[in-house]
């Protein structure tokens, strides 16, 4: 199993960051993402992200707004990402009123690419998600 972890601070309230980053239906169409669909609500919800000539189907496995933690997994092995057996967890920790730390970690087996390439793709997804959260919150 390969593990990728990104830890970054955000100059914003931890609860506000969780509301943005932990919103499982927040993915926007644009760039590499050509379509998005969400089925259900809360834990067990499934989102389908169309990108790169294929679909990534993810299920929300955990969502705790008090502990500021959520987790999800990829359900389809035929996804266009270079990973299989993927699961991820995001934990947000308050650093005072107006700052927090995001710890985003995922485990997977590389698929169709070596470990370094697969890790770089996943690392980019995590840093991109954190950057878009900063943008959404204006920080």
Image (cartoon, helix red, strand yellow):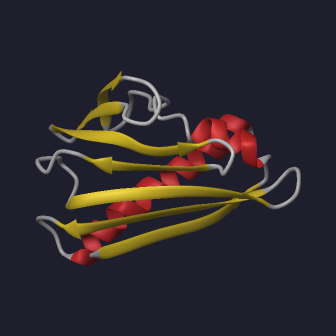
Closer to the camera in the image, 101 or 87: 87
Q: Is residue 101 above or below residue 16?
A: below
17 left or right of 113 in image? right
The quadrant the C terminus occupies is top right
- At a point 66% along the width and 51% down the height, the residue shown is 67
The answer to whether residue 89 of the structure is visible from this angle is yes
Closer to the camera in the image, 129 or 59: 59
Q: Quadrant of residue 10?
A: bottom right
Query: Residue 43: x and y, percent?
Result: 44, 36
- At a point 20% along the width and 69% down the height, the residue shown is 110
Closer to the camera in the image, 113 or 104: 104
Q: Quadrant of residue 41?
A: top left
Q: Quadrant of residue 18?
A: top right
Tell which residue pokes out farthest to the right in this image.
97
The answer to whether residue 139 of the structure is visible from this angle is no
The quadrant the N terminus occupies is bottom left
Q: Is residue 66 above or below residue 43?
A: below
How many numbered discs?
0
Closer to the camera in the image, 16 or 52: 16
Query: Residue 88: x and y, percent?
Result: 41, 57
Query: Residue 38: x and y, percent?
Result: 36, 24
10 left or right of 85 in image? right
- At a point 26% along the width and 70% down the height, the residue shown is 117
Query: Residue 133: x and y, percent?
Result: 61, 43
């Amino acid at each position: 199993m390969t593990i990728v972890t990104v830890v970054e601070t955000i100059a914003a309230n931890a609860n506000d960051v969780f509301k943005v980053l932990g919103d499982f239906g927040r993915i926007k169409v644009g760039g590499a993402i050509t379509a998005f669909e969400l089925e259900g609500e809360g834990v067990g919800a499934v989102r389908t992200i169309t990108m790169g000539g294929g679909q990534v189907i993810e299920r929300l496995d955990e969502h705790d707004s008090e502990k500021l933690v959520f987790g999800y997994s990829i359900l389809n092995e035929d996804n266009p990402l270079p990973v299989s057996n993927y699961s991820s967890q995001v934990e947000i920790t308050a650093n005072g009123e107006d700052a927090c730390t995001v710890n985003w970690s995922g485990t997977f087996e590389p698929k169709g690419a070596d470990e370094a390439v697969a890790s770089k793709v996943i690392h980019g997804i995590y840093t991109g998600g954190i950057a878009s959260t900063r943008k959404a919150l204006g920080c």
